Amino acid sequence: MENNVKIKIRKMDISDIPFVYDNEIKIFGRSLGEKTLYNEILYNDLAHYYLAVIDNQRAGYIGSWFTLPNAEILNVFVLEQYQKRGVGNALLCKVIDLCKELDIIYLSLEVRESNLSAINFYKKLGFKREAIRKGYYENKEDALLMVLDIGGKK
């Protein structure tokens, strides 16, 4: 981990919902919603949500669905004060490691075409640009569909 920061990755629980909801609104301008997050954590066996914690402070989160034989990252964020410290990498690696354990073939995500720092970050992890989703976001911005070949049984 960069800067000698100790990052703990743990499963998200219902006490984390206000943190995730509030920060999704601040960062993305919208959220999956508190009720959806609650249902995802408690009732959706496909859902895998994790929090990054530094010094007992929530630093970021990742939400994913494992729809075997593939998986999808729904949302990921790192709070600004924790960026460039390995938090995003730790969150993505947690999901990638779980994908490997479950013999996932492909892990996919969408990212704003304008979010060059995120696109470059995903490329460093091995994600490849697969397609463009025209007008994907509320402001009609296109999304890049990026895919990581995990290498599970095809």
Image (cartoon, helix red, strand yellow):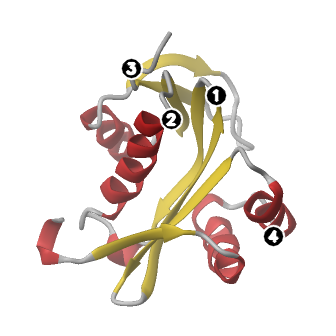
Alpha carbon distance from label 4 to label 2: 28 Å
Q: Secondary structure at mark 2?
A: loop
* Above or below: residue 76 compared with residue 35: above
Q: Residue at x 37, y 28 (%)?
A: 127
Kindly indicate whether the residue at mark 1 contacts the one at mark 2 (C-beta within 8 angstroms).
yes
Kindly indicate whether the residue at mark 2 contacts the one at mark 3 (C-beta within 8 angstroms).
no
Q: Position of residue 58 (x, y in %)?
A: 47, 80
Kindly indicate whether the residue at mark 4 contacts the one at mark 3 (C-beta within 8 angstroms).
no
Q: Secondary structure at mark 1?
A: loop
Q: Residue at x 57, y 64 (%)?
A: 27
Quarter of the figure with the N terminus: bottom left
Tell me the kind of residue under disc 1.
Leu
Query: Label 2: which residue?
Result: 102
* Above or below: residue 45 compared with residue 19: above
Kindly indicate whether the residue at mark 1 contacts the one at mark 4 (C-beta within 8 angstroms).
no
Q: Earlier in the sequence, mark 4 or mark 2?
A: 4
Left or right, 61 with respect to 32, comes to: left
Query: Front-most of 79 and 14?
Result: 14
Q: Earlier in the sequence, mark 1 or mark 3?
A: 1
Tell me the kind of residue under disc 3.
Gly
Structural crowding at the residue carrying mark 4, measured as other residues with C-alpha within 10 Å and reported as few (<14), some (14–19) or many (≥20) = some
Alpha carbon distance from label 2 to label 1: 8 Å
Left or right, 138 with respect to 150, comes to: right
Left or right, 6 with respect to 26, comes to: left
Q: Nearer the viewer, mark 3 or mark 4?
A: 3
Q: Earlier in the sequence, mark 2 or mark 1?
A: 1
Structural crowding at the residue carrying mark 3, measured as other residues with C-alpha within 10 Å and reported as few (<14), some (14–19) or many (≥20) = few
Query: Label 4: which residue?
Result: 34
> Looking at the image, can residue 31 be seen?
no
Residue 151 is tagged as 3
Query: Label 1: which residue?
Result: 68
